[in-house]
Amino acid sequence: CMANFTLPPLPYSYDALEPHIDARTMEIHHTKHHQAYTDGLNKALGNLGPEWQNKNDAVEILKNIDSVPENARGAVIFHGGGYNNHALFWNNMKKGGGGEPSGELADAIKKAFGSFAHFKTKFQTDTVAIQGSGWGWLVKDASGSVQFITMPNQTSPWTRWNKEKLTPLVGLDVWEHAYYLKYQNKRADYVTAWWNVVNWDEAA
Ligand code: MN
């Protein structure tokens, strides 16, 4: 038996983020990689019986990750994280994005990092430096402040909900599958290009 998660649609066409992120990468990333995390989440929950097979809110599952039976928890952290991270990631980008946030988010970034430029340098440097596969994240914490964190592999910031009440705002996927076709080993070039498509309205 399988759970019922389905691949969330991409909110724009595969070529919408060209030239910063190429259409072929977007298509494979969405239809193959994101689909694989979706299938993996359904399989992991499907092994756990009806109570888990019928769940349909990935964020609730991730926020309460300690309640997932131990024999499936690792698979749910990986595939459930991948499922939710990519859904956020697509919405965190748009054609004609970039620039800087405004309003409350801009104020929070300035308060936490000193300036948007400082935030950008920190986010870029530390995300590029992730060893192996992972994500850089701008998150909101329990006090309403924003923080930069990195997370390994597909582990979601939502899995830190019980201890820290972290809410992911903007995530950047630096798995090689996110950039290798266009940028090969040049992860920093991919991150530099990504700033041009960030959807700050969605993050706010
Ligand atoms: Mn990915």
Image (cartoon, rainbow, N blue to C red):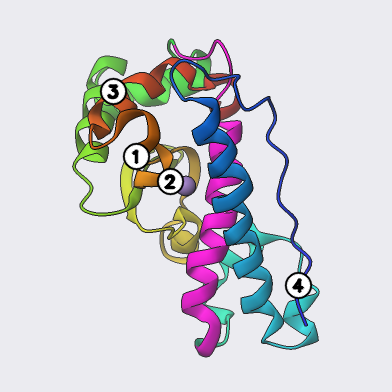
Label 2: which residue? 141
Q: Do the numbered discs 2 and 1 sit on residues whose CB atoms are within 8 Å?
A: yes
Label 4: which residue? 3
Q: Earlier in the sequence, mark 4 or mark 2?
A: 4
- State the extent of the magenta-drawn residues as a range: 71-98
Q: Do the numbered discs 4 and 1 sit on residues whose CB atoms are within 8 Å?
A: no
Separation of residues labelled 4 and 1 (CA atoms): 33 Å
Tell me where residue 10 appears, x and y as whole percent: 68, 35
Label 1: which residue? 147
In the image, residue 27 above or below residue 17: below
> Crowding at label 3, few (<14), some or many (≥20) Cα neighbours within 10 Å?
some
Specify the amino acid type for callout 3.
Lys
**SS for dot 3:** helix
Quadrant where the N terminus lies? bottom right
Tell me where residue 56 appears, x and y as whole percent: 76, 63
Residue at x 31%, y 48% (from the top left corner): 150
From the viewer's perspective, is the residue at label 3 or at label 1 nearer? Answer: 3
